[in-house]
Amino acid sequence: MLPSSMAILQRSVTDLKGVGSQLAAKLANLQIKTIQDVLFHLPTKYVDRTRIHSIATVRLNDTVVVEGSVTKVSVVPKPKRSLTVKITDGSGDITLKFFHFNMQQQAQFKQNVRVRCFGQIKAFRNGLQIIHPEYKVILDDAIVPVEEHLTPIYASCDGVSQNLLRNLVRQSLAIINPIAESLELLPVSVCRNLNFISWHETLQLLHAPPPDLDVVNLQKRMAFEELLAQHLILKQKRQALAEQTAYALSADNTFLPVLLEKLPFALTAAQTRVINTISVDMQSSHPMVRLVQGDVGSGKTLVAVAAALQAIAGGKQVAFMAPTEILAEQHWRNISKLCQHLKISVSLLTGKMAAKEKQKTSHALGSGQDKFIIGTHALLQDNVVFKDLALVIIDEQHRFGVDQRLTLRNKGMQPHQLILTATPIPRTLAMTFHADMDYAVIDELPPGRKPIETVLVNSDRRTEILQRIRNLVQSGQQVYWVCTIIEQSEVLDCTPAEQAWQDLCLALPDLKIGLLHGRMKSQEKDQVMQEFSNGNTNVLVATTVIEVGVDVPNASLMVIENPERLGLAQLHQLRGRVGRGNAQSYCVLLYKTPLSERSIERLKFLRDSNDGFAIAEFDLQMRGPGEFLGTKQSGVAQMRIADLVRDRELLPRVSAVGEVISQDYPELIPKLIRRWIRDQVQYAVV
Ligand code: ADP
Ligand code: MG
């Protein structure tokens, strides 16, 4: 049971005066359904109506209050009929202009009448004007007080006025006023340490701050609490998982040593370390949930295979899910080869397989005959059942939603989960927002990899680039040409990738040029990829569909057109498609001028850095966290107030306070979660 004071916050907005079902529906568009939602609908900005400015001191575009007496009133017929009222306050004069007005209004503005008005200052001939100001005629010597607080401006929608929102906030604050203390969820010691004032006071001030108050700190206090709630629910999820029982799988001494023996190279130290960590995880009778991050080419696949072998050695089943058919098949081919000596058969399940084949595979999985299945989303279908699925591996995690991961997991009895990603997750984010997973990093590339050399080239040097492609192809190498624009042009009758392909075919008539884009059927895609992979095509023109995982060591040049359209992390991932063989590899960022300074700065950073983490950090500052976390999928994006980028310096303190709360104030956890987490189902651990 919720304490009743907390329940007040969850009361419907229709409990507020003046809110009927129609208005409630409009408010729902603003995500406002409860009294608490009203309170959390923070102003996006404020205007200052707390003092009257002297006309001489106002500047263009200021939004201010001025007051003066009328010196001249006229109706100007041109260019558009308007009522203009000139007022002076002794320091200067200003013109008020109304395009919509009536006789009554006109009559109000008598000579020498005092008018107080509010609006934005614009230029007018040689002077200043306010168009359609809010105004009040002040009669005789009446003393009319100015506002005491800054006036909040809220995000709004049709049919919901600022005044209405202000009124709802006032009512809501009045309702919680008597119970304010009971609504505090941060311990006093935490507030003191972080210099936070109470929750209630913070909200009051945010909705009506005195002039000159720094609201940033108040907003941080709210954001902090929200981030804390997010952190705590993830921790809770992980604890719940730790109480579940999984297959305890002994370390594999059967297959792995044989596999390593046959490999033409030695594992890197980082691979060995992560393989061992995972092995220990899976020996536990509680389910592992481990996220392994490794830059492109760091050899994550082998780490996954080692984990798979441990499950198979224990007689159990493994499902390995990849986001595209190209990638699933590539994994299947490579892994089948690795497993040949081990006499382990690896099966494949993708959407394009014939129904009969699929059925056969499903059957072999259901009976437990097949131990190792690699596939795409096709694995998620209801008719795919396992006998005893002990390990789920997800490749390129950011391409899947949480729900998809859970669907696959639920095909076993709490299978271990291994999640692979090339996307570097800044440490602070990992600590807070992957608190539901363990985290390991493969922080080393196999030896002998030459760093990719990246250059920025203006598109007016295209001919040079084409010549370079000719030379490279002559020496037997291959080239990716990536087209980042996806929307169809209105002028051209084809997609930009098709256009780029046509252009290249014309410019390089002797070369074999393939085309790969997202709208092709998967069978076509595979064929094109296969041709490139076999070396039958010299140049592959592609959209970003080649972003994930594809491995063609003979490709040593990648040209990316309009690179500014992509995030740095994505560009880094793309460029990782080259530099996989022995040749020195290059990435050409082919940009068109004009390019904003910001874009240039970003691209230069990418050019100068090969460090996925540094790139991710930089991108996080410049762009936003979406692409790191797949935030929509992990629920993080649905935050009410916090913003992972803006508030990221709070994150280390969030996990520290999370510890304190878990240790000393566990009773606060459900309350914080209840207050802040909208969609708790997403986090459910069943
Ligand atoms: P990613 O981490 O991007 O998934 P992959 O697992 O596809 O990387 O590995 C990239 C390439 O590096 C593959 O061709 C793989 O065989 C090779 N590789 C993996 N580990 C090593 C190693 N320790 N030494 C040399 N090459 C390796
Ligand atoms: Mg990979």
Image (cartoon, rainbow, N blue to C red):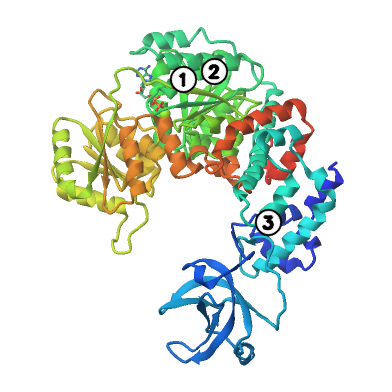
Q: Secondary structure at mark 1?
A: helix
**Compared to 120, does 486 lie above or below?**
above
Mark 3 or mark 2: whose residue is earlier in sequence: 3
Viewer-proximal residue, 457 or 346? Answer: 457
**Compared to 330, does 165 lie above or below?**
below
Residue at 36% across, 52% down: 486
Using residue 621 as the reference point, say whether residue 12 is left or right of it.
Answer: right
Spatial CA distance of label 3 from label 2 is 50 Å
Q: Position of residue 541 (x, y in %)?
A: 27, 44
Is label 1 in contact with label 3 (beta carbons under 8 Å)?
Answer: no
Residue under label 1? 303
Q: Quadrant of ligand 2?
A: top left
Q: In this view of the protein, can residue 524 be seen by the observer?
A: no
Q: Position of residue 685 (x, y in %)?
A: 68, 33
Quarter assignment of residue 119: bottom right
Mark 2 or mark 1: whose residue is earlier in sequence: 2
Residue at 39% across, 8% down: 261
Residue type indicated by callout 1: Val
Residue under label 3? 207
Q: Secondary structure at mark 3?
A: helix
**Compared to 361, does 592 lie above or below?**
below
Quarter assignment of residue 32: bottom right
Residue under label 2? 278
Q: Position of residue 95 (x, y in %)?
A: 51, 80
Residue at 45% across, 35% down: 617
